[in-house]
Image (cartoon, rainbow, N blue to C red):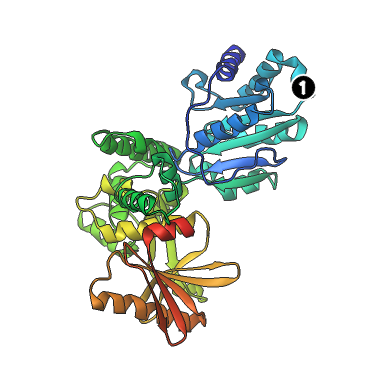
Amino acid sequence: MKEKFKIIITDFLEKEMPIFVEREIKIPINSKKIISLVGARRTGKTFLFYSIIEKLRKEKKNDLLVYINFEDDRLFPLVLKDLNLFIEAYYELFPNNREKIVYFFFDEIQNVDNWEKFIRRIYDTLNCRIYITGSSSKFLSKEIATSLRGRTISYEVFPFNFLEYLKFKGIGDNYYSSKNRSKIINAANEYLHNSSFPELLEASEIEKPQILKEYLDLIIYKDLIERHNISNLYLIKYLIKFLLTNSANPISITKIYNDLKSQAVKVSKNSLYQYIQYLEDAYILFPVKIFSNNLREIQRNPQKLYSLDSGLIDIVSITKDIGRRFENIIYLELRRKYQNISYLKLHQEIDFCYQSSGKTHLINASYQINELSTKEREVNGLIEGMEYFNIKESLLITNSHEEELKINKKTIKIIPLWKWLLQV
């Protein structure tokens, strides 16, 4: 195994970094903390590593930057004791580096059981900087914080946001230029209708559905069935299809339970809750609960679930609901920046409620407000919410409409999605 490690280490040192889009997420390149990148598969964690390595290569000797992917088939099967052979292999190759700061990049390290023991030991005993990634429920931020006991800072990685999408397309973000503004608006329409997984941006229209299906199958089999020993394949596939298809809708576990019961599928409500938790842990679905200071009210009301990527919805749904895709995009942009996002239910529902800098923010999402009744419903809901929280401003995000409304000393800014995505 040690010889394999030496080959893998040497191969990477000779490798040129691929071309990549600079991500908006800012990862420190010389932190004394262990840097953990968490998120779903194929969201670009490896390329974030490459980006950091590329920057470090400009100021550090190449042999101080060590990358290893624990999904490399040459390493299977790999157990905890083998990891020390990796360290031995490196310092046998570069014995003069023992007194220097070495940067270790461990990709998909959750594939090795008890990996955290190894990471803690080398962090405490070696002169090094450590970066790790993971894609499964064994690699959640809360679990990393526990197992690494305050030694780590975690960063969540999602598919491309809109600004990154524009960078990939070679489009600037200056919307004051009429020419560039047209390109931005056209790109926003594409962004709304397509997947934002990095690999999908270069794929042909024929390839995209198959790649997305492979992504979903990989998650189902590796992060759900294998990880949690799930034996009922039909049930987990049914649940994924139902939840993705109903993304941005209130979800009733009782309704799912009754639907399955009518199909003679034996499952308990507790199992359904557990499976949904597994999907959340795998970063496929994100729950949004009702806003309330009453815990019983939160538990009594349905959650809304949002998808990691609109493309995943496409491969399980027969029809495209543009309104729900629109709302899903807005949720994901909020989720990249804020943790505690709720929906508000008064006389009418407000899609998003969250705190930032000590202030409450309210957002409604409506793809079109051409109908007067639609506009009134969205506006009246926000007015009610602003009065409830005693705040002066809120947002209504639409596809193309832009306007500022002043009502009873309250301000509602109506803003197109593309502009909001560049300002948030």
**Mark 1: secondary structure:** loop
Report whether 262 appears left or right of 58: left
Front-most of residues 116 and 382? 382
* Image quadrant where residue 209 sits: top left
Q: Is residue 278 visible?
A: no
Q: Tell me the residue at 27%/66% (across/down).
A: 368
Vertical arrangement, residue 254 with respect to residue 308, above or below = below
Extreme residue toward the bottom, this view:
408
**Figure disc tally:** 1
* Image quadrant where residue 54 sits: top right
Front-most of residues 192 and 306? 192
Q: Position of residue 21 (x, y in %)?
A: 47, 37
Extreme residue toward the right, this view:
99
Q: Position of residue 315 (x, y in %)?
A: 26, 44
Q: Position of residue 371 (x, y in %)?
A: 23, 74
Q: Tell me the residue at 48%/76% (across/down).
A: 393
Q: Tell me the residue at 31%/42% (across/down).
A: 233
Front-most of residues 373 and 130? 373
Report whether 123 appears left or right of 404: right
Q: Tell me the residue at 66%/20% (across/down).
A: 63
Vertical arrangement, residue 273 with respect to residue 127, above or below = below
**For mark 1, what is the residue?**
98
In the rendered view of the protein, which quadrant contains the N terminus?
top right
Assess disc 1: are there few (<14), some (14-19) or many (≥20) residues with their C-alpha within 10 Å of its C-alpha.
Answer: few
Q: Is residue 97 visible?
A: yes
Q: Amino acid at mark 1?
A: Arg
